[in-house]
Amino acid sequence: MGTKTLFLLRHAKAITGGLLVPDQDRPLSDRGLKDSNKLGVKLHKKGVHLDLLVSSNAIRAITTAQIIANRLDMKRTNFLIDPLVYGAELNALLELISRIAKRYDDVMIVGHNPSITHLASHIVGEAIAMPTCSLMKASFDFKDWRKILTDKSSKFSFIN
């Protein structure tokens, strides 16, 4: 049996929006930049490898994802921006993951609250909190991402 690993990352802290800054255009705050870099360094030290990274199209998510991808020396071709991740319902995220090609074993989704929290809670089987720049790692005992629709995680952990 194969193993798939899914990392769920809530974007790092962004500046507070206002009337002049649309929600999707909010950049990371200084704290968000610092936290993203710190997490990227930690993942690099742990030897984390990602085959695919999928980010929301919001600036704060893209920036968080880029920092992580750069720290992990990812290929640009394995970095995707998908507008579906922004504001997605649980079932939409599960469908997105279920369509990931079998060849990708280690995948990260970078998104927002409440979507990432709902997905993490679904995978864990109980309500959990996902503050900004929090990362959950879940392992699955299957070879095909389509099984995400029916199978639960075999183990999970939080990396912060």
Image: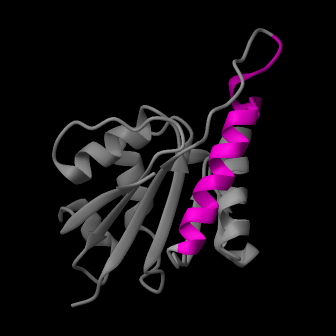
Percent coordinates x, y for residue 26 in the rendering: 74, 29
> In this view, which residue lies farthest toward the bottom?
1
Measuring 54% from the left and 43% from the top, which residue is drawn there?
Answer: 133
152 is higher (above) or lower (below) than 110: below
The N terminus lies in quadrant = bottom left
Choose top left, top right, bottom left or bottom right for residue 58: top right
Measuring 25% from the left and 72% from the top, which residue is drawn there?
Answer: 140
Give the side of residue 54 with respect to residue 37, left or right: left
Choose top left, top right, bottom left or bottom right for residue 136: bottom left
SS assignment for the magenta stretch, majority: helix
Measuring 34% from the left and 77% from the top, which residue is drawn there?
Answer: 4
> In this view, which residue lies farthest toward the top?
19
Percent coordinates x, y for residue 38 in the rendering: 63, 54
Q: Nearer the viewer, residue 15 or 97?
A: 15
Q: Which of 92 and 103 is in front in this view?
A: 103
Choose top left, top right, bottom left or bottom right for residue 146: bottom left
141 is higher (above) or lower (below) than 71: below
Give the side of residue 46 with respect to residue 95, left or right: right
Give the side of residue 28 with respect to residue 130, left or right: right
Q: Which of 160 and 142 is in front in this view?
A: 160
Q: Give the range drawn in magenta.
A: 20-45
Magenta span has 53?
no
Magenta span has 25?
yes
Percent coordinates x, y for residue 7 in the rendering: 43, 61
Give the side of residue 128 with respect to residue 160, left or right: left
Percent coordinates x, y for residue 107 in the rendering: 48, 69
Measuring 69% from the left and 24% from the top, which residue is drawn there?
Answer: 23
Q: Which of 38 and 140 is in front in this view?
A: 38
> In this view, which residue lies farthest toward the right?
20
* Residue 58 seen in this snapshot: no
